[in-house]
Image (cartoon, rainbow, N blue to C red):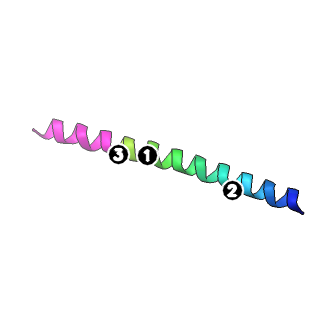
């Protein structure tokens, strides 16, 4: 039972870590697009 809880916790933690990485990448890409657009609009 304890082993199962630990496994579930590990999987949840790993998934949230991956989600955070994806969100960070997405936000940095969005920032890059915004910066590029603002430069090309000048």
Q: Position of residue 2 (x, y in %)?
A: 86, 60
Image quadrant of residue 31?
top left
**Element type at mark 2:** helix
Report whether 17 appears left or right of 2: left
Residue drawn at point x = 59 percent, y = 47 percent:
18
| Mark 3, residue position | 30
Give the main secondary structure, helix, strand or loop, of the magenta stretch. helix
Crowdedness near tag 1: few (<14), some (14–19) or many (≥20) residues, C-alpha within 10 Å: few
Residue drawn at point x = 38 percent, y = 42 percent:
28
Q: Which residues are magenta?
A: 31-42
CB contact under 8 Å: marks 2 and 1: no
Q: Earlier in the sequence, mark 2 or mark 1?
A: 2
Nearer the observer: mark 2 or 3; the answer is: 2
Q: Which one is in front, 25 or 37? A: 25
Mark 2 and mark 1: Cα distance apart in space = 21 Å
CB contact under 8 Å: marks 2 and 3: no
CB contact under 8 Å: marks 3 and 1: yes
**Element type at mark 3:** helix
Q: Is residue 26 magenta?
A: no
| Mark 1, residue position | 26
| Mark 2, residue position | 12
Q: Earlier in the sequence, mark 2 or mark 3?
A: 2
Count of marks, rendered view = 3
Report whether 21 appears left or right of 31: right
Residue drawn at point x = 45 percent, y = 45 percent:
24
Judged from this view, the residue extending furthest toward the bottom is: 1
Crowdedness near tag 3: few (<14), some (14–19) or many (≥20) residues, C-alpha within 10 Å: few
């Amino acid at each position: 039972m304890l082993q199962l809880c630990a496994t579930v916790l590990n999987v949840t933690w790993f998934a949230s870590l991956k989600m955070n990485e994806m969100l960070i990448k997405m936000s940095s890409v969005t920032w890059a697009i915004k910066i590029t657009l603002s430069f090309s609009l000048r």
